[in-house]
Image: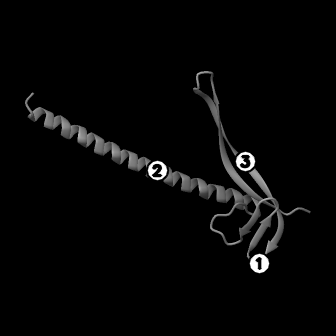
Amino acid sequence: MKDLWYRAEVKRYSSIDEWGDVVGSYTQIVWSTYEVERYTPRGVIFKGWGFMRGVAKRQLALPTKELALRDCEIRKEHHIRGCQNRLRAAEYDMEVIKREQSRLRSSDRREPL
């Protein structure tokens, strides 16, 4: 019997009309399977892919679907944190722009034409 390991990924699909506008979308969990060629003392060798360390922080695949889904959740949480950090940076940049616009408007009032 084949020994399979699993990887779960979130895929978002969108439908667009002839003008390029999104008219609908949905999200789906996509499962990938990796067949184990053999186990080594330090990890796993997958057929057609290669070696993966058994204690790696980021793993390509995991031995059960439950672990693979939890790994997918952790990756998505990391993605969300990164997006939140970029949003905070963009909001701060917008504050700097507004302050500079205000400063320019106030300096324009003081200078005669």
Residue found farthest to the top: 18
Q: CA distance from mark 1 to mark 3?
A: 30 Å
Q: Is residue 75 above or below residue 107?
A: below
- Residue type at tag 3: Val
> Can you give x and y, in whole percent of width and height, for residue 58 in the image?
64, 64
Q: Of the numbered discs in the image, which one, if any, rests on residue 41?
A: 1
Q: Of the numbered discs in the image, which one, if any, rests on residue 30?
A: 3
Residue found 44% across the figure and 49% down from its top: 86
> Can you give x and y, in whole percent of width and height, for residue 78 in the image?
55, 56
Q: Earlier in the sequence, mark 3 or mark 2?
A: 3
Q: Earlier in the sequence, mark 2 or mark 1?
A: 1
Q: CA distance from mark 2 to mark 1?
A: 40 Å
> Can you give x and y, in whole percent of width and height, for residue 41 in the image?
77, 78
Residue found farthest to the bottom: 41
Q: Of the numbered discs in the image, which one, if any, rests on residue 84?
A: 2
Total numbered labels placed on residues in the image? 3
> Can you give x and y, in whole percent of width and height, for residue 29 in the image?
70, 47
- Callout 1 secondary element: loop
Residue found 63% across the figure and 30% down from its top: 24
10 Å neighbourhood of mark 1: few (<14), some, or many (≥20)?
few
10 Å neighbourhood of mark 3: few (<14), some, or many (≥20)?
few
Q: Earlier in the sequence, mark 1 or mark 3?
A: 3
Residue found 19% across the figure and 37% down from its top: 104
Q: CA distance from mark 3 to mark 2?
A: 25 Å
- Residue type at tag 1: Pro
Residue found farthest to the left: 112
Q: Quadrant of residue 38?
A: bottom right
> Which quadrant is home to the C terminus?
top left
